[in-house]
Amino acid sequence: MDLALRAGEIVTVVGPNGSGKTTLVRALLGLERLSGGTVTRAAGLRIGYVPQRLHIDATLPMTVRRFLSLPLRISDELAESSLKRAGVAGLSGQQMTSLSGGQFQRVLLARALLSGPGLLILDEPTQGLDQPGVAAFYRLIAAVRQETGAAVLLVSHDLHVVMSASDRVICLNGHVCCEGTPAHVSAAPEYRALFGLGTGGTMALYRHHHDHDHDHDSGHGHDHAHPHHPHPQPRPQVEDAGA
């Protein structure tokens, strides 16, 4: 498998269970020993990570503010700035166990953004959210990309939303089955063999609505439908060969 991530790019990785998505993420994070190949990171690259799930015991008292300071304490200013960027300003005093699903995921995103990452990796970050919550979360990711210039690697099954938010889609099934723009991948025989024909139609409807309805988002999250728009100053490039 050969994969390169460029600054300011949103790349979505899709594939059935057992296709290698989690192994790829773990390899990029340095948590998986490779049987072959190499992972090459740009010098000084900082990586932010939003996990697939995080369990916090309901009996454990932990505020959002305390959670953001694990394992290293951060300033109140940095905590509030990161929460604001993730769309959950003012939650510092809330208990983590009292948050809604959408709030919890945004707090995880806020924590991932603390270091000012050049690469943001999200492993199925919207599990358990309803459809409006999923769409809102990915609009937020597109806005973060636009603001920070970070590369974003998404792993998800939310195909019709995620693919519409992506500049590039990579379909895995033990190897790279197909790769390209959302429109290219959704029409590829390899993709349709894995996911069927229905997803392509749903994605097309979503893209039509997103590209032409400007009244609801007021521009928020709209830029990702037009990848030719300029991004902020690029961050270091990540290259992965053989993961």
Image: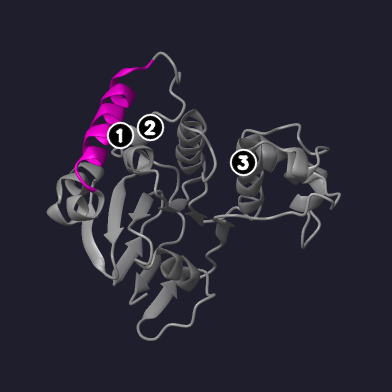
Dot 3 amino acid type = Arg
Q: Secondary structure at mark 2?
A: helix
Horizontal arrangement in the rendering, residue 45 relative to residue 77 (left or right): left
Q: Which mark is residue 145?
A: none
Q: Which residue is mark 3?
A: 106
The residue that appears at 86% across and 49% down in the rendered structure is 61
Please provide the residue range marked out in magenta. 196-214
Q: Which mark is residue 226?
A: 1
Farthest residue in the bottom direction?
35
Residue 39 percent location from the top left of the image: 41, 76
Amino acid carrying label 2: it is: Asp
- Image quadrant assignment for residue 40: bottom left
For discs 3 and 2, the disc positioned in front in the rendered view: 3
Are the residues tagged 1 and 2 within 8 Å (C-beta)? yes
Q: Which mark is residue 223?
A: 2
Foreground: 33 or 101? 101
How many numbered marks have been drawn onto this rendered protein structure? 3
Describe the element under mark 1 as helix, strand or loop: loop
Residue 57 falls inside the magenta stretch: no
Specify the color scheme. one colour
